[in-house]
Amino acid sequence: MVDLDLLVDLHRDGERQGPGGDDETRQSIALSGLRGARDLRVADIGCGTGASTLVLAHELDASVVAVDLLPDFLRRLDRAAERERLGERIATLAASMDALPFVDRSFDAVWSEGAIYNMGFERGVRAWRRFLKPEGVLAVSDLTWLTSNRPAALEEHWMEEYPEVATASAKIAVLEESGYTPIGYFPLPERCWLDNYYRPLQDRFAGFLSRHGHSEAARRIVEAEDREIALYERFSRFVGYGYFVARRDED
Ligand code: SAH
């Protein structure tokens, strides 16, 4: 099995494939000012198994297009949407976030939780802007420095893994320079990482390893996840996910 198949197998049964929380999605909705608006069109990019998609479809009067590269994740979302009677509101689409088949100015909002790093924050916010109607809303969470100074070991790790990690003010400046007016920011609380993402992931390690006969490739994946979790536990005061909400400027 190649590593991607293994990663899918490890993450497919998770409610989330990254840090987040239903309350925090609701908080971003509150900041967006879209509650109460009628008949919205919303995209949720890099939706994984769709934790945020389900909240968006419940809370907004919207049809939501949920996009992910991996059809395995989307199948789980399709089943959850049926179960929660949201099948009419949620459409899933297997596509890459850097080649979206959308019409310009066709969405009232673009959401993306913990996924824009796959394109890079700046490339992503610039590429997705054209899909928004004038004054449409962008809501993204991305890895963010919480303080202006960090321990060197932490800085080295993330600069290697994701060089666009930056302070909230730097990310807000990128939004301003990319044609948006920032309207809100908040950091995800620690429980979005630990209770909602890392603990359930750790609970799946044993089953994952035994499904794959404790192969070296499977063990390597678990070890890498364990290292990332230990790093987060040690340094959660300095790094986290920032949630950024912004409105498209007029041209
Ligand atoms: N938003 C979800 C998933 C975050 S994990 C959550 O918060 O739980 C990042 C997601 O991005 C994964 O589901 C992964 O399959 C998806 N992804 C990675 N590269 C992608 C690409 N090029 N286009 C679309 N989705 C991608």
Image (cartoon, rainbow, N blue to C red):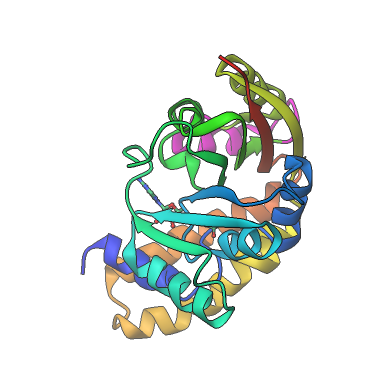
Give 80 or 104, whichever is nearer the viewer: 104
Residue 30 showing in the rendered view = yes
Is residue 227 in the magenta section? no
- Residue shown at 48% from the left, 38% from the top: 106
What residue do we see at 76% from left, 41% from top? 33
Span shown in magenta: 146-164
Splitting the image into 4 quarters, where does residue 24 fall?
Answer: bottom right
Q: Nearer the viewer, residue 96 or 56?
A: 56
Q: With 25 as the anchor, is 177 left or right in this view?
A: left
Which residue is at a point 57% across and 78% down the rendered structure image?
85
Give the image location of residue 12, x and y in percent.
42, 71
Percent x, y of residue 244: 67, 36
Query: Where the C terminus falls, by quadrant?
Result: top right
Q: Is residue 88 left or right of residue 142?
A: left
In this view of the protein, which residue sits in the foreground, 43 or 118?
Answer: 43
Q: Which quadrant is home to the N terminus? A: bottom left
Q: Position of residue 136 (x, y in %)?
A: 61, 33
Question: Is residue 19 visible to us here?
Answer: no
| Left or right: residue 24 compared with residue 10 | right
Q: Is residue 45 above or below residue 143?
A: below
**Residue farthest along the left direction in this orientation:** 1
**How many discs mark residues in the rendered view?**
0
Q: Would residue 133 appear left or right of 74 to someone viewing this image?
A: right
Magenta segment includes 158? yes
